[in-house]
Amino acid sequence: MNKKVYISILVIIVALLSFYFLAGGEDVSLKIIKGDEEKVVDGEYIYSLEGAITFPAVIRSSGQKPVETEYKGIELSEFFQTLGIDISDAERLTFNASDGYRVILSVEEIEEPKNVYLVYERDGQPMKSKKRGGEGPLRIIIRRDPFSERWIKHVDEIIIE
Ligand SMILES: Nc1nc2c(c(=O)[nH]1)N[C@H]1C(S)=C(S)[C@@H](COP(=O)(O)O)O[C@H]1N2
Ligand SMILES: [Mo]
């Protein structure tokens, strides 16, 4: 290959890679496991869901003043519907986070209307991963739970059983 062409291709590849990383190219993916079935959902799918809403929330971290904020995301039960996943025959859902944090919720709690949400944007900004100092890229918010200790950050796996 001509040396010029070779260098041009190299420059383009480096430019694309740096754009990807500088633009905050997070690897957003969520694994959902039910029995022997396993589905991996990516950020593109989640960000383009039509049922997403924006709602206010108050975060109460231990030893800090409550913080009023706004999240954007989709109700978890609706999210499962879009994927054709039925949780009505299950008992509980286990949420695992990339930092090892784990929360278990009952199906009743998740099916309560307007309670449990999968969110990806806070105050109009996409949420960053733990590595980038954020609470995302995905987080579970339980609106009726005033203590945010169960609002699991960096969620990357949901096990339905
Ligand atoms: N993945 C993950 N989620 C988590 C935690 C954690 O350590 N890891 N801490 C919980 C606790 S105890 C609280 S009070 C809130 C804190 O939320 P904040 O960091 O947005 O203030 O997140 C909850 N979710
Ligand atoms: Mo906490």
Image: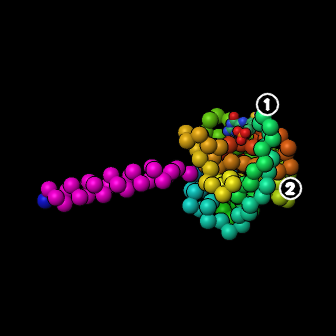
From this view, report whether residue 47 is shown above or below residue 64.
Answer: below
Q: Please identify the quarter of the rendering in which residue 94 is found.
A: top right
Asked whether 49 or 13 is in front, the reply is 13
Residue that appears at 68% across and 48% down: 139
Q: Which residue is mark 1?
A: 63
With 23 as the anchor, is 4 left or right in this view? left
**In the current view of this chain or complex, which residue is farthest to the bottom?**
50
Structural crowding at the residue carrying mark 1, measured as other residues with C-alpha within 10 Å and reported as few (<14), some (14–19) or many (≥20): few
Would you say the residues marked 1 and 2 are in contact, meaning their CB atoms lie under 8 Å apart?
no
From this view, report whether residue 27 is shown above or below residue 49.
Answer: above
Q: Which residue is mark 2?
A: 112
Q: Give the residue type that dot 2 points to.
A: Glu
Q: Which residues are magenta?
A: 3-28
With 128 as the anchor, is 160 left or right in this view? right
Query: Which quadrant of the figure shows ligand 1?
Result: top right
Give x and y (percent) for residue 97: 65, 40
Q: Secondary structure at mark 2?
A: loop
Asked whether 133 or 142 is in front, the reply is 133
Asked if the residue at label 1 sits under 8 Å from ligand 2, the reply is no
| Lower sequence index among marks 1 and 2 | 1
